[in-house]
Amino acid sequence: VTKPQFHRLEYHHLALSKTGTIMLCELAPSFGFIGLWATLTALGLASQVILSGSVFMLSYVNPTYEQWTRKTNPEYPTAVMVRDEIIQMLKGLVAATIPPTLSLYLGDKGMTQGYCGLDGHSYNYTAFTFAVVFLGSDFFEWGYHQLGHRYSSMWEIHRHHHKFYNPSPFAVIADEWADQLVRASPLLTLPLLLPVNMDMLFFTYTLLFYGYGTYLHWGHEFDMGCASDMKVLNGSYEHYLHHAIAIKNKPEHTGFFLKIWGQLAGTEHKGPCRCAKCERDAGKRTKEQWAKVVKPDYSPLLQPDFWAKGMQTTAKSA
C-alpha cells in the first residue's frame, strides 16, 4: 500500500468509528473504474429524478392558474419535447460522470491531492477551497458557455441544448456528451491542482450547481419584483431568456450563478424586460388567457412505447 493510500484508509477507519458514515474516498477501493463510473451514474440519475423530477411534477403536471402567472413563457412544453430533454439529459449524464470517476480512481492511487475529512487541514482552509471551487467553477462555466456561442465549431455541439427553447427542469444537463465532459472536468482538474476536500467538491457540483441549475431551468419565477432588479445572481428569467434568444454569435446571459462575468463582457440582454411580473403588469396573465393555454398530457412519459419511439428518433438523427 502506498503512503497516500495508507493515510486515507487509516483516516476512514477513524471516520467510520466516530460517525458511522462512509465518505466518497471509500468508493474507489470498493469498485473498479467501470463499477465506480456505474455507481456515480446511478447516484447522479437518482439526484436528477429527485431534483428535476419533483420540480417538474409540482410545476408542470396539473398546473394551477397561480403557478402559470409566475411562468416566464406562457406556453408549456409538449410531452415529446420533455421526453427529448430527458433523453438528452441521460446522454449528458453518462459523460458528466467520467471526470469525477477518474478523480476518485486516480485519488485512490495517490495521483491527485483530493482528500476526505479534514486530513490535517483546517476548517478555514476548507472554507477557502470552497470559495475557490465556487468562484472558479462559476467563471469556468460562464467562459466555456460563452465560447459555445462564439465559435461555429463549438456551437455545433452546444446547439443541441438550445433545441429546448422553452425548457423544463429536465434540461439542466441536456447536452451533448462533449459539452458535459468539459463542464464536469473541474471535478478532475481541481484535485490535480490543489488539495481539496472531495466531499465538499462533489457536494458543490451535485447539490449546489445541479440544484441551482434546476431552478434556472424551472421556467417559473419567484415573487421578488422585476427580474431586471436582480443585480448579483442570474435567475430563472435570465436563463429562460438565454434559451429563447441566445444563438450562434449571440452569447446573451451565458452565466450560471453570478452576473458579474456577463456584465463585464457586456453580454446581458439590453431589450425590454419580459419577466412574469412585467407580463402580469401588462395584463398578459389573465384568467381568460389561462383558459386558452394548452395544458399538455404528460402521461405518455410513463409509457414504454413512447420512450421507444423517442430512442429510435434519437438514433436516426445521431
Image: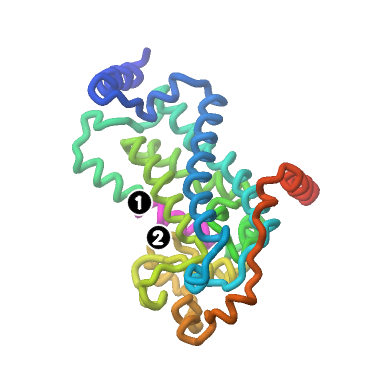
Q: Distance between the residues labelled 2 and 1?
A: 9 Å
Residue 134 disc label:
1
Q: Which residue lies furthest to the bottom in this view?
A: 282
Q: On the picture, is 229 further left or further right than 89?
A: left
Task: Please say whether residue 109 is one of the residues in the magenta stretch.
Answer: no
In this orientation, which residue lies closer to the viewer: 132 or 317?
A: 317
In this orientation, which residue lies closer to the viewer: 297 or 213?
A: 297
The amino acid type, in three-letter code, at marker 2 is: Phe
Q: Is residue 288 above or below residue 45?
A: below
Q: Is residue 3 above or below residue 155?
A: above
Q: On the picture, is 278 further left or further right than 196?
A: right
Residue name at image x 71 percent, y 45 percent: 303
- Locate residue 135, reporting x and y percent: 35, 54
Q: Is mark 1 on a helix, strand or loop?
A: helix
Residue for badge 2: 257
Residue name at image x 63 percent, y 73 percent: 293
Circles 2 and 1 in contact, beta carbons < 8 Å: yes
- Locate residue 178, reporting x and y percent: 61, 47
The residue range painted magenta reads 134-147
Which colour style is shown? rainbow
Q: Is residue 16 above or below residue 151?
A: above
Task: Please say whether residue 144 is one of the residues in the magenta stretch.
Answer: yes
Label 2 Cα crowd, 10 Å radius (few <14 / some 14-19 / many 20+)? many
